[in-house]
Image (spheres, rainbow, N blue to C red):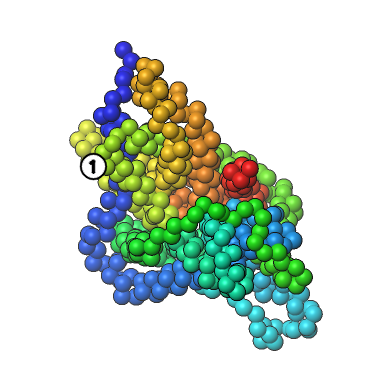
Amino acid sequence: MRFKFSLSSWQLIAWTTGLGLSLPLAFLIFESLQSDPNVFNHLWDTVLWDYTRNTLVLILGVALLSCLIALPLGWLVACCDFPGRKHFEWALMLPLAMPTYLIAYVYTDLLDYAGPVQIQLRQWFGWQSPDDYWFFDIRTLGGAIVMIALVLYPYLFLIFKTALKEQSHKLVQAAHIMGHGPVAGFFKVSLPLARGAIVAAITLISMEAMADFATVNYFAVSTLTTAVYDTWFGYYSLTAAAKISGIMLLILFLAIIIERYSRRNRAVFERQTQLSGEPLYTLKGAKALAATGFALVILALAFAIPTAVLVSYAFNYFDQAWNDEFFLYAWQSLKIATMVSILAITLSILVVYYQRLSTARYALWPGRLASTGYALPGTVLAIAVLLPLTSLEIGINDWLAQYDYQPGLFLSGTIFAIVFGYLVRFYAIAHGAIESSFSRISPSLDMASHSMGRNERQTLLGVHIPILKRGILTAALLVFIECMKELPAALLLRPFNFETLATHVFQYVSDEQLELASVSALFIVLVGLLPLYFINRSMEHSRS
């Protein structure tokens, strides 16, 4: 007899998914409220305030620098015509494929005292020692801000550029008629109308900046993210790590509250006369040259130079980098990423379909609960995942001890931990993409399917899934790429002697030997370019 899905069956699946994926966050909050008189109090009395200050400075610095880069570029690409504009529209998003720690290593290698830049300067000017000249130290908090902003600015660039293209053409023309030039129109019309999109993008950038571990760790900058890692590996105190994670959660919630508060009672209604494909302003002469030059400099610093250096490393050290380790770690990374992608897509389809079937307001809650993990930085997520897994393992081992059998770390000591952790963190990406795709399917198709005698399961498989193919592919690809690039969670959750490409590359970066893992690093970058390619194709398809 075939099993028939009723609404209660879909409800059970959805709520099990929501509660299961939000369980680590609940354990983390509970553990952070426990007493820990030794480790956490010691950190509180000594270095925790410095870690918190560095974290806040990092967030504010990255947000500000991202605005200085992305807002002018977004306006130039969306509203102005200048040489190379169509190419910059997609090329300026390429830095998203570059992990921050790779850029950090490349520029450290280039700009250090023994690097080619300072060597060349000493040859040109005859300097003999560091006392003869001043040169900035990139391995500082300021250097970390620059490195992270160069990778994260495309979030704001893409969102702001899209917001500008959706604005009414007539509003900008009205500002021009009133005597406002391009710059004044930008500050008085375009920027205020896109304020909500800008704040949302800055919030996302701030969350990603706080979550960064590899760059600040490589630059020896102490932040709350590195504190969680050091507390776990240095003191083996989950409670203290959970308390530090709680501080990071508080900062995250404050950022989200500020973002929501900034949009309170603000609604902008525009007639749907959007910017056409033709730009509003045509730049000529020095202005056109400045626009092209600015875009070229940012693209070169954020993507072209690091990629060229990695290609050079891979060419010069190919024999050492192209080895059995590369194939093993690539296979392990691909395996984990594929498993998580399939699980995330499957669960998100089931949860979103339940939302579609149910008319109850609480039907949205399973998806929201399951998506809470995306806001957690990688190190915080790892601690959150370890808490329920280790609690379950301790309970089962204690119970089986009476039968003289103890399975040990059968969850946290296997790839189950890393798969579950990635699923908790990246489920929200799949859920958002699938939910968006489902919303474009007319309810009339469901009614037509039911009138032909098909039940909910048959409608999902026979009607919705074929229509959702593009959305499913996009969601799976985004989750896959994020899993390939994830580092902090992998460092904490990987089993003994288990490496991914990200952890493999980071180990060599930490040892100042990225050249020996250059092929692995390039592979991560090339894989990261795939979603950018599909996003660009999708945008071109929507404009046509």
Question: Is residue 5 something that shows in the picture?
Answer: yes
Q: Residue at x 71, y 66 (%)?
A: 283
Position of 102 relative to 51 (above/below): above
Residue 195 screen position, x and y as percent: 47, 64
Q: Residue 15's x, y, as percent?
A: 28, 38
Q: Quadrant of residue 135?
A: bottom right
From this viewpoint, which residue is outermost toward the front? 177
Q: Is residue 146 left or right of residue 236?
A: right
Instruction: Count up the numbered dots.
Output: 1
Amino acid type, label 1:
Gly
The quarter in which the C terminus is drawn is top right
Q: Residue at x 26, y 29 (%)?
A: 8
Residue at (35% x, 40% y) in the render: 411
SS of the residue under disc 1? helix
Query: Seen in the image, is 523 located left or right of residue 149?
Result: right
x, y percent for residue 177: 60, 69
Q: Nearer the viewer, residue 379 or 232?
A: 379
Task: Establish if 406 lies above or below 446.
Answer: below
Reading the image, the residue beneath label 1 is: 395
Q: Quadrant of the N terminus?
A: top left
| Quadrant hosting residue 180 | bottom right
